[in-house]
Structure formats: structure tokens, C-alpha cells
Image (cartoon, rainbow, N blue to C red):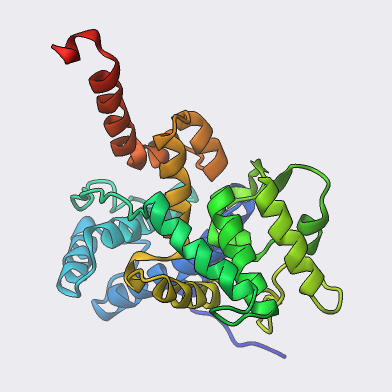
Amino acid sequence: MPTGPISPNEALIRDYLDMLAAERGAAVNTLAAYRRDLDDYLAALARGGHDPVAMEAAPLRAYLADLETRGLSAASAARRLSCIRGFHRFLYAEGLAEDDPSAPIGGPRRVRALPKVLSVAEVDRLLTVARQGATGNAVAGDARGTRMLCLIELLYATGLRVSELVALPRAAASTKERYLVVKGKGGRERLVPLTEVARGVMRDHLANLGADGPWLFPADSESGHLTRQSFARDLKIVAAAAGLRADRVSPHVLRHAFASHLLQNGADLRIVQELLGHADISTTQIYTHVLDERLKSMVRDLHPLMDA
């Protein structure tokens, strides 16, 4: 089907996203988020009569101020500024713009919030309800219940990103290895150890799958596998049945629980970084509050003068 000419701004966005995909291996979800951010930013510039290849810092400052009035959090505004800054740096590096208007812009002040974490006892309650669901005693006791148990056990046992979890291949359930090879952000591969429990629930789930297909969690979706949104919705149903507040439970919270509980039990921060697939240790350092508490406990329990 023939298409009409694209606007100059659309061409700039496409060139930038193509560069991110080709040179930096940006994931599909990242590219989609960047496109939304840039569409909003360039539309605001157009309303003010500003050209992104020939502008100063003032329109960008005005846009950031408008984000605050629209109720965006400091974290969301900082993420959007990062996208816009990368876009202007790209235009400057490619010789499409004479200046980078984002260079003098400081980012919004961010207070890094501690991640929501479930206790070990709360995760046990969640898993108990999921196991009952898989055997017909609680939430949807059928193949769907077995699938839900598999998803929760795997997530808590491996700390996978939800996008990595729902897109696992069917072959993962029949591997003879005690680990999975997972391709994460930026196309980086990592080894993720599997517990015997995780391997067992994958085998049980595989036995309930119907016709052959490429996915471990197939679904009637555009991708062909379970969507993150569907899993998150079903997880809240299990959480409610376990007596947990739905707003405290999400796939990402279970990933945080995986990391926090490992650190509480003595795991090294660098090892947890590898297991989570974080490219930079600074990302993993949101869990340092766990390490602080562990160190305080060690001094309190082990230092010879504490008895005095």
C-alpha cells in the first residue's frame, strides 16, 4: 500500500529510533516508550512554533515545566528528559543541528524510592494459594491454575523481568540443564539458575499445554504469548485470595522480593546484579538498605563488645 510523505519531525524520530535499535540494541518496549515521549515533545514544540533542529534551551525548559503542571513525577520527567537529551545529542552528532539545546538543562531532582518488597511469609502465602489453585482448591483449579503457579514460582525463583518471563520458549520447560539462557535488555545474554521446584512446575505446566507452539505461555495475543498486563491482572487476583493488598503485589514486586531475600540471606551484591541482568551496579544499589540492615545485625550479633 503506498504511503504519503512523512513530516520532517517524523523523519527525525525514525532516524533516531533506528540508530538506537541498530547501534545500541534498544528493546522494542524501549523504542515504543521513546516514540511516545518524542511524539509528545515535538508536538509541544510545534505548537510553540519551534524547530527541534534550530532552537535554544528555553523551549525545552518550558516543556519540562509544563510536565510538572501535568502531574508527572520527578522520576517520569527525568526519564523523559533523558530521552529528549539523547535525541538532541543525536541531531548534533549527525550534523542536523548546530547546537544541543539540552546541554545546559539540569535534570529534575529525584528522590530514589525504595522498592516495594514482600516478606518471605507473604510470598509463602501467595505461593500457597497458587498451589491450591493448581490442584482445584482455590483460584481456577485447572490448566490455567497450573500455569499461574508456574509463572509465580519461576518469577520468585529466578528474578526474571516480566517481559523475559512471559516470552520464555517452550523448550525452557524440557531443558536438562539447571539454568536458563535468557536474553535481556540490549540483547545481553545471562545464565539464570533453576531450582528443582521451578523445574518441576515447568514440567507440570508443559504437560497441560495443548498443541505444539514456540511459547511456554501461549496466548491469543499479537505476540502469541501471554502479555505482561494479563499476568499482572491475574497475579492481583491470587494476591487478594492470599489476603494481600493488590496494590502491593505485581510481577516487579516479586522480582524485588527475589533480590532482597537473596541479599538478606548473605548473597553478594555483584551476584544479584548478574542474576537480575543489570548492566550497571548502580541500578542494583537500590537494595543497599537491605545490606545496611544485614551489616547492623552482624555487628550487633557478632561484635564482642556488644554484650557489654
Residue lying at the far bottom in this picture: please name it.
Answer: 1
- Of residue 300 and residue 296, the one placed in the foreground of this image is 300
User: Relative to residue 203, is residue 122 drawn left or right?
Assistant: left
User: Relative to residue 173, is residue 90 drawn left or right?
Assistant: left
Q: Residue at x 52, y 64 (%)?
A: 128
- Of residue 77 and residue 295, the one placed in the foreground of this image is 295
Specify the quadrant of the image occupied by residue 301.
top left
Residue 244: percent from the left, percent from the top?
A: 35, 68
Q: Is residue 187 above or below residue 292?
A: below
Quarter of the image where the C terminus is located = top left
Residue 7: percent from the left, percent from the top?
A: 49, 79
- Of residue 88 and residue 198, the one placed in the foreground of this image is 198
Residue lying at the far top in this picture: please name it.
Answer: 304
User: Relative to residue 241, is residue 136 drawn left or right?
Assistant: right
Q: Is residue 165 above or below residue 264?
A: below
Residue lying at the far right in this picture: please name it.
Answer: 212
Q: Is residue 94 above or below residue 77?
A: above
Residue 208: percent from the left, percent from the top?
A: 78, 74
Whether residue 7 is visible to the viewer of this picture, yes or no, is yes
Specify the quadrant of the image occupied by residue 283.
top left
Whether residue 215 is visible to the viewer of this picture, yes or no, is no
